[in-house]
Amino acid sequence: MDKAKEIYTISDPTQLWVIAEIKERDIAAVKSGQDATFTVLAYPQKTFQGKVVLVGNQVESGSRTLEVRIAVENADGRLKAGMFADVEIITTILENVLLIPDSALQTESDNQMVFVALDGNKFEKRVVKLGLEQAGRVQILKGQLGEE
């Protein structure tokens, strides 16, 4: 009998890792300690929280991605090993920005625009310059009221 042979592995299902693959162009923005959120197919309406604990050191040559490890609390046991997750890593927090639902955007030629409600039933068409997008919302950089 070989005593070095592994029979089973003991793990703690209340502490899990989510392994994410980030694109090579995003490597500089991801660091240990950043917050991450994710969803899984089994619970599409639930957003889970985690924290980046390890950023890999080798880019996968075929996919041009880097492995990132995210620690997750799983006290209720809903998350299972092997589940697929859709992960967002929070790399920047912007404060005091104008956000609108992306459904409010209209496209005319090459321009993005919105209709701004004035007094009564009057609306003004305004060409806008967009910033970052996340979770169905988009940042407006130019085109705000009082802006030339």
Image: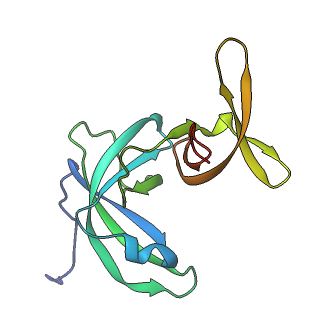
- Position in image of residue 106 (x %, y %): 75, 40
**Residue 77 seen in the figure:** yes
Image quarter hosting the N terminus: bottom left
User: Which of the two residues, 23 or 76, is positioned nearer the viewer here?
Assistant: 23
Q: Which residue is drawn at 62% across and 45% down?
A: 143
- Position in image of residue 67 (x %, y %): 39, 74
Q: Which residue is drawn at 27% across and 40% down?
A: 77
User: Which of the two residues, 126 or 23, is positioned nearer the viewer here?
Assistant: 126
**Residue 82 seen in the figure:** no
Q: Which residue is drawn at 63% across and 40% down?
A: 102
- Position in image of residue 142 (x %, y %): 59, 50
Q: In the displayed structure, does residue 40 sit left or right of residue 5?
A: right
- Position in image of residue 123 (x %, y %): 72, 24
Outermost residue toward the right in this view: 109
Image quadrant assignment for residue 56: bottom left
User: Which of the two residues, 108 or 55, is positioned nearer the viewer here?
Assistant: 108
Q: What colour scheme governs how the chains and residues are painted in the rendered image of this protein?
A: rainbow
Q: In this view, does 77 lie above or below 66?
A: above
